[in-house]
Amino acid sequence: MPAEFAEASYILNDKQLNKQDRIDKANEKLSDTGYQVHPDSGRDVQLFVHSDGKKGVIAHRGTDFNGNRAIKDVRADLAYMTGNETVFSKEFSKRASKTKKILKKIDPNMHITMTGHSLGGASVNHSLLKEPDIRNRVDNVELYNPLLHHAGSSKVHTKRHEHKKDVDDQLNNLITIHRTKNDLASAQKPQHGKVKNYKQKFHSTRRTNPFRDVFDKVEQLSAHSLRNFL
């Protein structure tokens, strides 16, 4: 189910619709889940709350391949994958700050899941590593073909009296990474979490693709698609 919220996060970034239409479209997409968009949701970080008020999902939006900055964003994604975290450091910090604000506003007893696809998976992971208040509040994390970089481990920020080994164990228990077997973005060994591999089920039918100069072939972009999990 968390993949549906990662998909809804893209809907809430649709620049061709006004804000209310985006919310209505996302709520329609999630109508069978019992969840709806919370008013504090934005374009990059969204909160979905179940009708029972006891469960919530926080989603971070991934790279929108349909946006007018798509090719530039994909190139930035690849820079991150090669270890250049600075390409997203400011954006990731903003997303972590927004997530903390959302968590402070909601019922402290609400069961929280975090999710994200691609860039969204990377920013969720960043938030968990850098913000103890986030990882200590979240109950589970589901990432889909997240961007994983090649430069080794990112530093985990700990609070006083926290031991890094305990935090590593906590993150390993929290995070599940869902990836298609031939996806390039998530091909590296993750710093934390367990990995579940899936066969690719979505295949592009287009003969040409604007990302051919970025990815080796169209099928690799298809392997990265969130559609493989829906």
Image: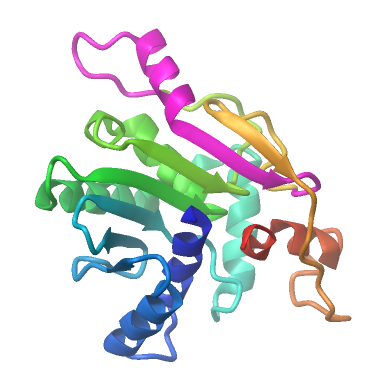
Q: Position of residue 158 (x, y in %)?
A: 28, 19
Residue located at (42% from left, 45% from top): 124
Tell me, yes or no, if residue 120 can be seen here: no
Which stretch did the figure color magenta? 156-183
Residue 197 to residue 79: above or below: above
Q: Indicate the position of residue 130 as horizontal and vertical percent values.
A: 33, 32
- Where is residue 57, by image quadrant? bottom left
Q: Does the image show residue 127? A: yes
> Does 78 lie within the magenta span?
no
Residue 199 against residue 73 in the figure, above or below: above
Total marks placed: 0
Is 100 or 80 nearer to us in this picture? 100
Q: Name which residue lies at 39% across and 77% down.
A: 26
Image side of residue 145 versus residue 193, left or right: right
The answer to which of 199 and 187 lies nearer the viewer is 199
Q: Residue at x 74, y 47 (%)?
A: 184
Residue 196 image point, x, y percent: 66, 37
Is 50 on the left or on the right of 4, as rendered?
A: left
Residue 40 appears left or right of 210: left
Colouring of the image? rainbow
What is the x, y in percent for residue 70? Answer: 59, 72
- Residue appearing at x 47%, y 71% in the figure: 10
Q: Quadrant of the C terminus?
A: bottom right
From the viewer's perspective, tell me whether residue 27 is left or right of residue 54: right
- Up/down of 14 relative to 80, above or below: below
